Image: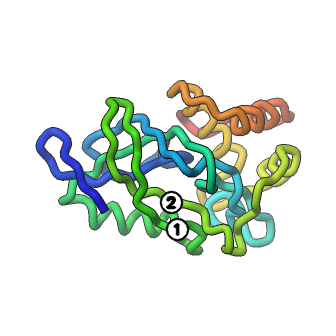
Amino acid sequence: MTTGTTSRTQVRWVFGYGSLIWNPGFQFVEQQQALLNGAHRSLCIHSHRHRGTVEQPGLVFGLARGGSCRGMAFAVADDDWAEVREYLREREQVTGVYREAWRPLRLADGNTVEGLAFLVDVKHEQYAGRLPLESQLKIVSGAIGASGPNVDYVLNTAEHLRALGIADKRVQDLARMLEGQPGNRLTAAL
């Protein structure tokens, strides 16, 4: 676990690649776009809580092995780290579907830092694998969880990736398919 400094404050970094990009929910002192190598963004986790239920699971993003992922890195002051870490565990580790790992992140300013990333546990029962877009569309279209409709989650992520200039073809393709369905609109405030 490596810490860095920003504006003379000791910090630890967190990597966001899905809803953490547009809804981190924790205090941070800096954010920058970042590149994580060795894993890619994938809609590969069945959600039984936030974006679906056990009876009708949704899908959420995970960091799957291979490739790379552009996302957002958040610097958290050491004084806030214990509280943020606990918040992230409550939010991300409801069922233990992720493995917490420290990975090098290449920041937009050219620096490399170690950041906490949540990698999918491919042995977990909620791991959906690499699903075809048509299967993702069917699952996402009908799922609603404690944090709202699965459609909103995917469309919010796609919209924020576009706004940041982050290209992710599979996410954008699915978003276009969802936007083309009658009644599907981005309902969450951006």
Residue 55: x and y in percent read 80, 71
- In the picture, the quarter occupied by the N terminus is bottom left
Q: Earlier in the sequence, mark 1 or mark 2?
A: 1
Please say if 171 is above or below 87. Answer: above
Which residue appears at 29% of the width and 65% of the height?
Answer: 83
Answer left or right for 117 relative to 149: left
Q: How is the image coloured?
A: rainbow
Q: Three-letter amino acid code at disc 2? A: Phe
Query: Where in the figure is residue 84, as x and y percent of width and height?
Result: 33, 61
Q: Is residue 119 left or right of residue 125?
A: left
Helix, strand or loop at disc 1? strand
Q: Quadrant of residue 47?
A: bottom right
- Image coords of residue 39 (percent x, y): 58, 51
State the CA–CA distance, disc 1 to disc 2.
6 Å
Mark 1 vs 2: CB contact within 8 A: yes
Q: Residue at x 52, y 38 (%)?
A: 70
Residue 113 higher or lower than 65, as above or below? above
Name the residue type under label 1. Answer: Arg
Q: Secondary structure at mark 2?
A: strand
Residue identifier under label 2: 118
Q: Residues within 10 Å of mark 2 (few under 14, many from 20)?
A: many
Q: Which mark is residue 60?
A: none
The residue identified by callout 1 is: 99
Q: How far across and how far down the image is residue 41, in percent? A: 62, 47
Q: At 71% from the left edge and 56% from the top edge, which residue is drawn?
A: 44
Nearest the viewer among 177 and 36 is 36
